[in-house]
Image (cartoon, grey):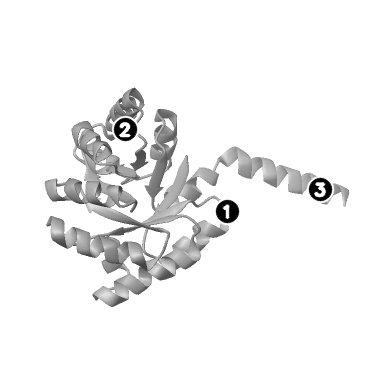
Amino acid sequence: MKFFIDTANLDEIAEAQALGILDGVTTNPSLMAKEGITGEQNILNHYVKICEIVDGDVSAEVISTDFEGMVKEGEALAALHPQIVVKLPLIADGIKACKYFSDKGIRTNVTLVFSAGQALLAAKAGATYVSPFLGRLDDISTDGLNLIAEIRQIYDNYQFNTQILAASIRHTMHVIDCAKLGSDVMTGPLKSITGLLKHPLTDIGLAKFLEDYKKGN
């Protein structure tokens, strides 16, 4: 399972990279705005800075909602750095753009996926990644994990190469559950990754080891 961090914060990305387990980064306009990054050129420059920190794929999202606009933006984003993956919304023109980029060998991440049918369309269009938002489904009392399971079954049935990127991860158990279901990638905040380190028995055991060492040294 690949671990992506969902942020535009360079310090958080660097911290996750330093752990040695980070495989990529996902971002969106909201995350950019949260970091105070505005203006087209500043946003483009920030994507490059992210690519210089992490070794893996970096999803960069288009703003346009029409086919021509997505193609123009997506080609500019892909030209920024070899690690850039063009992030497209799951709408009709987004699927058209996904097929266009797929035919040209440009990698894509189709986002805002909330149903198995949407995920099937993205795979048919050749998406590199598909991003089902399980946390947002949980927020409205819908089983987000069931969506991951449905997509996994469909993709396995037809040997689609599209990778399931579980997005809108809220906590560590989301990570574990997605791993059990066979999600190819998870993306979430830093705390959802570092939270996997924590267990009270680890802390108790380490404290005991150190206490016993001090007694004999």
Q: Which residue is mark 2?
A: 148
Farthest right residue in view: 217
Characterize the local packing of mark 3: few (<14), some (14-19) or many (20 or more) Cα atoms within 10 angstroms.
few
Q: At 26% from the left edge and 47% from the top edge, which residue is drawn?
A: 110
Residue 15 at x, y percent in the picture: 51, 61
Mark 1 belongs to which amino acid? Gly
Q: Are marks 3 and 1 in contact (CB under 8 Å)?
A: no
Closer-to-camera residue (49/202)? 49
Q: At 43% from the left edge and 48% from the top edge, which residue is drawn?
A: 192
Would residue 105 be visible to someone looking at this image? yes
Q: Is residue 195 above or below residue 58?
A: above
Mark earlier in primary sequence (3, 1) = 1
Label 2 – label 3 distance at C-alpha: 47 Å
Mark earlier in primary sequence (2, 3) = 2
For residue 144, what is the image quadrant? top left
Farthest top residue in view: 157
Residue 188 at x, y percent in the picture: 38, 49
Residue 140 at x, y percent in the picture: 18, 39
Residue 213 badge: 3
Element under label 3?
Answer: helix
Q: At 19% from the left edge and 46% from the top edge, which residue is drawn?
A: 95
Mark 3 belongs to which amino acid? Tyr
Q: Is residue 47 above or below residue 117?
A: below
Label 3 – label 1 distance at C-alpha: 29 Å
Left or right of 165 on screen, residue 21: right
Left or right of 185 on screen, residue 121: left
Q: Which residue is mark 1?
A: 20
For residue 25, what is the image quadrant? bottom left
Residue 168 at x, y percent in the picture: 31, 46
